[in-house]
Image: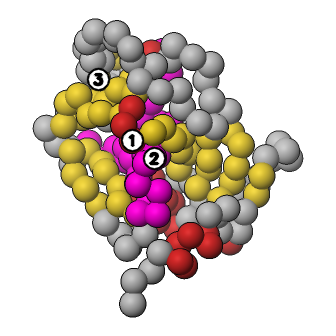
Amino acid sequence: MQTGADGSKFIVDESNTNGVVFEGGCRCGAVQYASSAQPSSITLCHCRACQQLSGSAYIPFTGVPKTAFKFTKSSSLQNLKLSDIAERTFCSSCGTPLTMEYKFDENRISVTMGSVDSKTMSCELPTVKTHIYLSEKAPWVVLPEDGTERWGTMETAHLLASNKTD
């Protein structure tokens, strides 16, 4: 059990890290995961769903191949389907958003950076590359001039339209 900066207690999974590039999980420790692949660059999603689910302006995501990702503890893991486009997971005990999978990209899983334990990274930490869904950006957010890509929706939006079933 470790103590957070705010004085709250949380569990750190200290299991065998053989072949694991990074680990993470929810705030309360009921859901834990491991990845055997390096994370991709970070995408900041400003869509309204991410705002509402995080209680903030956006959710930062990184991606890994689905075959490299596994939940190692999942007693309170819940699925959340807000649309036909993607499915998310979160911890039903503490509310931590954990992952999102797009239906058009069945080989990848996006992981929320807030759930990644950066101390477990055996590679370089990913950096922010892209802001997506800026058309839904919270009006009180001022984006830095950081040289990142900026999309009104997302780079792969054309795949969403071609994936619809009538």
For residue 37, which numbered disc appears in the image? none
Residue at figure coordinates x 71%, y 43% from the top left = 129
Say if mark 2 contacts mark 3, CB within 8 Å.
no
Where disc 3 sits, the SS reads strand
Where disc 2 sits, the SS reads strand
Amino acid type of disc 3?
Answer: Phe
For residue 66, which numbered disc appears in the image? 1
Quadrant in which the C terminus appears: bottom left
For residue 10, which numbered disc appears in the image? 3
Residue 110 shown in magenta: yes
Tag 3: Cα neighbours inside 10 Å, few (<14), some, or many (≥20)? Answer: some
Q: Is residue 5 shown to the viewer in this render?
A: no
Residue at figure coordinates x 53%, y 72% from the top left = 160
Q: Is residue 72 left or right of residue 7?
A: left
Residue at figure coordinates x 58%, y 55% from the top left = 45
- Vertical comparison of 71 with 82: above or below: above
- In the image, which residues are magenta? 94-119
